């Protein structure tokens, strides 16, 4: 059985979970916002040398972390909730 996908709506808010690995830390991000802004945030992370991969909500919820921070990225309200494990 094929899984049906909803059509992509560029104006709708999107939500995803990401695992980000940098030289000194590993983070799980809960990201919500406009898809183009989310894409820009991900691009900036990759450009700065981070490894980024999409994960599930279960992986995000079971991630063991040292601290948790919520940020509003910019005026277009990309909201990022970060769980950080410092290496």
Image (tube, rainbow, N blue to C red):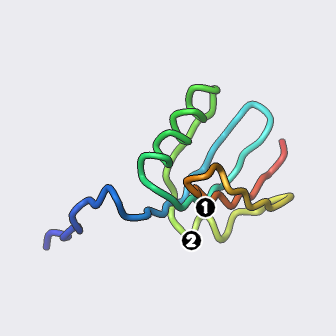
Q: Earlier in the sequence, mark 1 or mark 2?
A: 1
Above-or-below relation of 34 to 51: below
Looking at the image, which residue is at 64% across and 57% down? Answer: 80
Residue tagged by mark 1?
Answer: 30
Which numbered marker is on residue 6? Answer: none
Looking at the image, residue 15 sits to the left or right of residue 83; the answer is left
Name the residue furthest left. 1
Above-or-below relation of 79 to 47: below
Q: How would you rate the neighbour count of disc 1 (Cα within 10 Å): few for under 14, some for 14-19, many for 20 or more?
A: many
Q: At which x and y percent is residue 76?
A: 55, 53
Question: Which quadrant would residue 67 be assigned to in this image?
Answer: bottom right
Above-or-below relation of 78 to 49: below
Looking at the image, which residue is at 45% across and 55% down? Answer: 34
Residue tagged by mark 2?
Answer: 58
In this rendering, which labeled residue sits more in front, label 1 or label 2? 1
| Location of the C terminus (image quadrant) | top right
């Amino acid at each position: 059985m094929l899984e049906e996908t909803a059509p992509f709506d560029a104006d709708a808010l999107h939500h995803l979970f990401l695992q980000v690995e940098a030289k000194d830390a590993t983070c799980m991000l809960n990201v919500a916002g406009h898809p183009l802004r989310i894409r820009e945030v991900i691009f900036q992370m990759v450009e700065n040398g981070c490894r980024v991969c999409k994960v599930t909500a279960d992986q995000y919820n079971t991630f063991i972390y040292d601290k948790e921070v919520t940020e509003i990225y910019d005026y277009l309200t990309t909201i990022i909730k970060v769980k950080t494990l410092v290496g």
